[in-house]
Image (cartoon, rainbow, N blue to C red):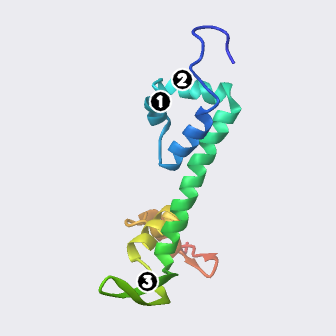
Amino acid sequence: MSNAGQPTKYKPEYCDLAHNYCLLGATDKELGVFFEVTETTINNWKNDFPEFFESIKSGKEDADALVAKSLFQRAIGYSHKETKIATFEGKITDSKEYDKHYPPEVKAGQFWLKNRQPKKWREKPDPTEQENQDNQVEGFEMVAPE
C-alpha cells in the first residue's frame, strides 16, 4: 500500500459489496461509479488489498460459471421438477409434481460451439484451412506430382 497522496476511501466491508455487485455483472468501471472513485482507484485497491481483489475475482468467476452452466443447459436441453396446482373457488383442490422438459435450443448450442471451438464452428470458414483439409487423406498430405 502506498503512503503518498490522500488517505484511502477503502473500507473492509467493500469486499462483500464488490463481490455481490460482480455477481450482477459489474465491471471495474461500474465498481468505480458504485464506490464513487475512479477505475484507477479500483485497480489500486485490488493491488493494495488482496482480499478486495479476491472478492472481485470470485464474484466475476461465480457469475460467469452460473451463466455458462445455464447456457450449456439451454444448449443440450434439461428437465426440472414442477408442481401443477388445481384450484376451485380460490381453494387448492389438487397438486401434482411432474418433470417439465425444455428441449435443446439451437442458438444456444451454436453460440457455445462458436465460442468454445471457433476454428471448427465459425460462420465463414478460413479458405486456407479448408484447402489444407482437402489436401489431406487419412493423416497423409497429398503432394502434387513433379
**Label total for image:** 3
Q: Are marks 3 and 1 in contact (CB under 8 Å)?
A: no
Q: Residue placed at 46% from the left, 63% from the top?
A: 128
Report crowding for label 1: few under 14, some 14 to 19, many 20 or more residues within 10 A (C-alpha). some
Q: Is residue 101 visible?
A: no
Q: Residue placed at 65% from the left, 27% from the top?
A: 47
Residue at the spot of label 3: 103
Residue at the spot of label 2: 41
Q: Amino acid at mark 2?
A: Thr
Whichever of callouts 3 and 2 sits on the residue coming sooner in the sequence is 2
Instruction: Check disc 2 and report its element: helix, strand or loop.
Output: helix
Q: Residue placed at 38% from the left, 67% from the top?
A: 123
Residue 7, label in figure: none
Q: Amino acid at mark 1?
A: Gly
Report crowding for label 3: few under 14, some 14 to 19, many 20 or more residues within 10 A (C-alpha). few
* Residue closer to the observer: 50 or 128: 50
Alpha carbon of mark 3 to alpha carbon of mark 1: how far? 41 Å
Residue at the spot of label 1: 32
Q: Which label sits in the foreground, 3 or 1?
A: 1
Instruction: Check disc 3 and report its element: helix, strand or loop.
Output: loop
Report crowding for label 2: few under 14, some 14 to 19, many 20 or more residues within 10 A (C-alpha). some
Q: Residue placed at 62% from the left, 36% from the top?
A: 15
Q: Amino acid at mark 3?
A: Pro
Q: Quadrant of the N terminus?
A: top right
> Could you say where residue 102 lies in the image, as x and y percent from the top left?
44, 82
